[in-house]
């Protein structure tokens, strides 16, 4: 019995550690700068109703966390403002008028006529777990998956792109090697 409790304890610690690097933040690293004034660690990032980053808190509907090194945003990637107006369908936290809430759930962005899915974002407690973008024909365009890490390295991710016909085009990890962020080909 003691052996089973010990094994269960180890398993629970392991499972907690897997999710911890993506779902919990140390408050002492939130919105901090280094001695040179450069952003480091986690920062609150405001986004509008189309999940596009905004500097104006007045336009913000949601917020999430971004991670910076040396004043450079490491993750998540910023949505291009050129994406334009979309229709957001939510399976998760939904903001009421006038409030700004933490993103937590699955967020589906459709084109403004709601005819096709543009993007699917899976976000857990403000941390982006994965992003999928789609072509107009419904095929997946690209996948950025932060749950699939290169050699268990924090903030590395699997980056995959597909052609419009669904064939694989690019299958790499984005990771930090020798203090530089690079793409490393994923073995199939």
Image (cartoon, rainbow, N blue to C red):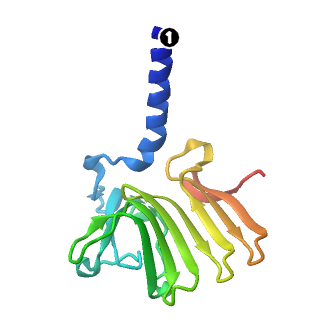
User: Residue 177 vs residue 87: left or right?
Assistant: right
Taking the view exactly as shown, the residue that stands out farthest to the left is 98
Against 49, residue 129 (above or below) is above
Q: x, y (%) of residue 188?
A: 78, 52
Displayed quadrant of residue 19: top left
Q: Residue shown at 28%/54% (left/top)?
A: 30
Q: Position of residue 124 (x, y in %)?
A: 41, 55
Q: Which of the pair 120/25 is nearer the observer?
A: 120
Relative to 174, say whether 138 is above or below: below
**Percent x, y of residue 51:** 41, 75
Say which of 123 and 91 sits in front: 91
Which residue bears the numbered disc 1?
Answer: 3
The percent coordinates of residue 104 (x first, y second) are 38, 60
**Residue at image x 66%, y 77%?**
138
Question: Which type of secondary structure does the marked residue at label 1 adopt?
Answer: helix
Graded by Cα atoms within 10 Å as few (under 14), some (14 to 19) or many (20 or more), the crowding at tag 1 reads few
The residue lying at 56 percent from left, 78 percent from top is 118
Q: Residue furthest bottom?
A: 113
179 vs 149, nearest the viewer: 149
Count the numbered circles shown.
1
Horizontal side of 26 relative to 80 (left or right) equals left
Residue at (23%, 77%) from the top-left corner? 97
């Amino acid at each position: 019995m003691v052996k089973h409790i010990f094994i269960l304890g180890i398993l629970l610690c392991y499972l907690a550690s897997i999710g911890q690097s993506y779902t919990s933040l140390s408050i002492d690293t939130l919105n901090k700068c280094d001695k040179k004034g450069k952003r480091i660690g986690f920062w609150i990032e405001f986004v509008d109703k189309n999940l596009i980053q905004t500097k104006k808190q007045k336009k913000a509907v949601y917020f999430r966390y971004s991670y910076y090194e040396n004043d450079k945003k490491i993750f998540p990637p910023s949505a291009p403002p050129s994406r334009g107006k979309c229709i957001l369908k939510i399976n998760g936290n939904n903001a009421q008028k006038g409030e700004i809430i933490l993103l937590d759930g699955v967020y589906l962005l459709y084109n403004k006529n709601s005819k096709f899915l543009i993007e699917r974002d899976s976000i857990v407690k403000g941390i982006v777990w994965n992003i999928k973008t789609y072509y107009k024909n419904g095929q997946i365009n690209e996948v950025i998956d932060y749950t699939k890490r290169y050699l268990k390295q924090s903030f590395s991710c699997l980056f995959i792109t597909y052609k419009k016909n669904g064939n694989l085009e690019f299958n790499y990890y984005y990771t930090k090697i020798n203090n530089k962020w690079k793409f490393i080909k994923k073995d199939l």
